[in-house]
Image (spheres, coloured by chain):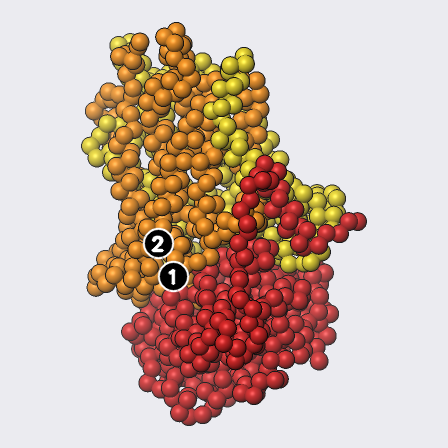
Chain colours: A red, B yellow, C orange
Amino acid sequence: MKVLGRQTVSLLLATTMLAGVLAGCTRPADEPTAPPKGNGEGSPEPITLRMTVWGAPDELAAYKVAIDRFEKEFSHITVDLQHIATDYDTKLTTMVAGNDVPDIAMMESGTITFPLAEEGKFHNLQEFLDNDPNLSLDDLVPNLLYSLEPGHVIGIAPGPESFGLFYNEAMFADAGVEPPPSKASEAWTWDEFVETAKQMTLDTKGRNASDPDFDAKNIKQYGINFPTWWGGYSNFIYSNGGDFVSEDGQTFALNQPEAVEVFQNIADLINVHHVAPSPVQAKNIPATNVALQTKKVAMVIDGQWASTALAQSNFDYNVGVLPVMKQPMTTIVCGMFSMFKSTKYPQESWELMKYLIDPESSIDMITVGTWMPAYKSWYTEPELLARWTQNLPARPSGYKEAIIDVLLESSHQTPTGYVKNFSKIMDIVSPALDKVWLGQQSAQEALDAVAEKAQAQVQGRRNLE
Amino acid sequence: MRKGLFYGLLFTAPAIVGFLLFTLGPMIASLALSLTDYNVFKAQTAWVGLDNYIRLFGGEDELFYQSLGVTFYFVLLRVPAVIIISFAVALLLNMNVRGKSIFRTIIYLPSIVPAVASAMIWMWLLNPDLGLLNSALSAVGLPTSNWLYAENSVVPSVVLTTLWGIGGTVIIFLAGLSGIPKQYYEAIDVDGGGWYSKLRHITIPMVTPTIFFNTIMTIIGSFQVFNEAYILTEGGPNNRSLFYVFYLWRTGFRDTEMGYASALAWVLFVIILFFTYLTFRSSKSWVYYEGGGRS
Amino acid sequence: MRTSRPAMALGYVALLVVSALFLTPFVWLIRSSLMDLSQIFTMPPEWIPRPFQWGNFHKALTYLPFGAYFLNTSIIVIGTLVGTVLTSTIAAFGFSRIQWKGRDLVFAILLSSMMLPTAVTLIPSFLGWQMLGFYDTYYPLIVPAFFGGGMFNIFLLRQFYLTIPRDFDEAAVVDGAGYFTIYFKIILPLSRSAVIVVALFTFLGTWNDFMGPLIYLKSDQLFTLALGLQMFQGTYTAQWDLLMAASAAVVLPCVIVFLVGQRYFLEGITLTGLKG
């Protein structure tokens, strides 16, 4: 079996395109990244670093602030910010194939990041963290790092995102129903949660869902809008003591009682209690704030990034702590910055990374509600905390207890960070879950039916100590 | 005829050269890749011969047959719908009425409006609980549907959402209709025939070359449907809208298994080629070229 | 086509109904472009902005360098238009009006290029252009237009040419005309509708293409309008009000070009007067 190296393949592909006709007419190939040879910090020779990001202009503005501060400190370095507007994975994959990779890339854990990491494309940031005089692991909020295996860090997030129970205060006041608590210690049990959702679900005649005459075919207001993607339900699986794979990482675990209970509970919200609308996929639509604002839904479970749109919506909203199965829990989801091993300036790139995760650089995105800071000190020290939570429309009264405290005390890493082969496993699980949400099968049946195929895709976990 | 050969090649030279330079190479490259286990990120690539194809047809990959079935279903529904509706709309737009320019532009608008606008409207129309279509249906006592969110209705619903984009097909029909000489219609008038006669004996036969073109293009395009899966359904529910090219793209760019994805691509290529060939063969019996045909 | 009064009236009503349906996305786009973010996604939709956010347009178009994007897109579009109209018409002529050995086989082979999903030729094509040194330039986007401009156009034109009666060619040959004369003086004018369609589609396709620029461009000063529109997407959400305003602005030239272009569709050629 003949084996070809990567360079050979690239060359083969490129040459076949010309079909030999242009053999004599090639222009000398441009060097895609041609920084002059520098030799580390303190060198006066000008250096260019390249980083790729995605994001809307306001997010880019935050990166640009970081870059400006960085360039002021390191005046011999220029940063070339390359914005990949859409189809990030496709573009980055093409760049990797063409050996045109940046020094730093923003990455997202669910798709091509770990495949790249497994081929050794990224630097191990643990080494940088260990050697850095100013920044250490303890300075960061928990679950902010992505590791290939313990000790091998491939990405650091600029800030965490967690989940909360957002609600419309006016609707609760009008109905005379107790709104969701914000303290984790006072969190609702699942049953209490369902009970409240029923009271807040109304049919066109004004009857709520606890009423025996409730007309499930003519609902004008739902109690809760529940996300059916893995980010949403993972909170509850962890809260219930379950997981996606077993502790040793060898066995598929979503058909275990802890996870099954969660799936069934969610499906029952839709099909049995009629307090949640059918799950509709809505990529990037600010459904949360609109649903709450227009009083179509009384409560919504969503990522805290929803705060931005909610803040701009001019109605009284607040956030409570998620209902608890066994323990309070929130999943942390976030992107990350990774450093390509092919970089000519690892040390400089590391310095840039520090500026990118420094909350001072992204203060605007943090105050408007979209991001949260990466440094623990910003959560624990009162003046820093005040800077991004006091008197801001994006941080209502429940925010500190419901979001911040839970994040610090009871948070869990996103499954994409430690479940190997996550996408392929979910390719099998999600279609099965579709049937559960639609009420066609019970959660236990659906997951047992795919357990074997899912098991075949399980390849272990990354966080085995 | 030597002179014919010389001029024939001369006129088609840019197209042929372009094909050789820009298209043939990548096509051969992808064919070669389909015989390897090429993964964009891995350092080594090995020849695996026909292993990818065996894996496809051998049943190990059930998503292959699933996506093929889903796509066939889609093509079967969409091609007749598009051709018939586009033709009907083109006939309407061909009428000599006031403001026909405006009407024509309006029909074409959804094709150039950003996909997200159309997607949003459909999400509103087809929302099972709050959407317009279901509200309208239940208001008149008809059964509602879950549209995009139920296994049995997702493919027809997707076909429905694509019907907005028929603008291009309609325009091509319009161009075809515009080439029919007025005298032919006048001849029918003289004979005392009505609009049906004109349609059946003049319009449709004269427009068969355009029908032929639109049919082939719609077949080729429908087999390669992608955006609807990517934006609207993500292949669900339960993989019932896992269109072939979406599955292919996911394999090649999310899982970075480019070799396997290339094999998928070439299987589709053969299928499309086959159906195109069938349509070409059948064209001899129903397509009328006033210029005397292809020979 | 003379149709009876009631048929016309019925047709007109049908036209109105269909147009109303097809107008919805465009109306949605325009009303969203003038709305506040909080109003855009209300369900059921509100059709009148309250208040009218005219500022959206200014904000959106200055957020990103849309002026530069407009110039860039224009360059690419003009290049592609010229190349496509030129080479697709002569290629289609060669495939339909000249008899030569192997003609139909060559046509079939070229046509087959449309049958392979571009996802798998993306990387090889990119690598090829990169090796030529044209990464981050407009060459990959414009040069192929001068080499046929795509089988879609060639196939379309071929179909139209085949409907033109042979008598014209034969008469011209008798008069001593060569192929180029036939192409230029007879076929091209008679297929005006189809050529306009090709030009329109090329304009619209290139104007709205973001995949090509995404893959082949790197420096943001080279970016195009379509790429610029994609830039309003954020990580978790998009700036919809600005995106809609920018989209409306970008769509406007297309609408104008289309309105103007479709006026030139021939309304049934009368063949008398073209003899000789």
Q: Residue at x 43, y 20 (%)?
A: C162
Which mark is drawn over residue A375? none
Q: Is residue C94 visible?
A: yes
> Looking at the picture, do discs 1 and 2 lie on one chain?
yes
Q: Quadrant of the N terminus of chain B?
A: top right
Amino acid on which the number 1 mark rests in the picture: Phe
Q: Which residue is at 62% across, 35% downward?
A: B270
Residue B290: x percent and y percent? 41, 15
Residue C242, quarter of picture: bottom left
Q: Is residue B243 above or below residue B5?
A: below
Q: Residue at x 67, y 79 (%)?
A: A151
Label 1, secondary structure: give it.
loop
Residue at position x 58%, y 24% from top? C105
In front: label 1 or label 2: 2
The tag on residue C232 is 1
- Please name whichever residue, C209 or A44, is drawn nearer the observer in this view of the structure: A44
Mark 2 residue element: helix
In front here: C247 or A24? Answer: A24
Give the residue at the far top of this rendering.
C174
How far is mark 1 from mark 2, CA to CA?
A: 14 Å
Disc 2: which residue: C69
Which chain letter matches label 1? C
- Name the residue nearer the viewer: B161 or C117: C117
- Residue A73 at x, y = what percent? 44, 81
Earlier residue among tags 1 and 2:
2
For disc 2, the chain is: C
Residue C218, how many percent across, how many down?
46, 57
Tell me if mark 1 has few (under 14), some (14-19) or many (20+) residues whose alpha carbon lies within 10 angstroms of its own. Answer: many
Q: Are marks 1 and 2 in contact (CB under 8 Å)?
A: no
Q: Is residue B261 left or right of residue A173?
A: right
Instruction: Confirm whether residue A188 shows in the render.
Output: no
Q: Give, as a three-letter code, the residue at label 2.
A: Tyr
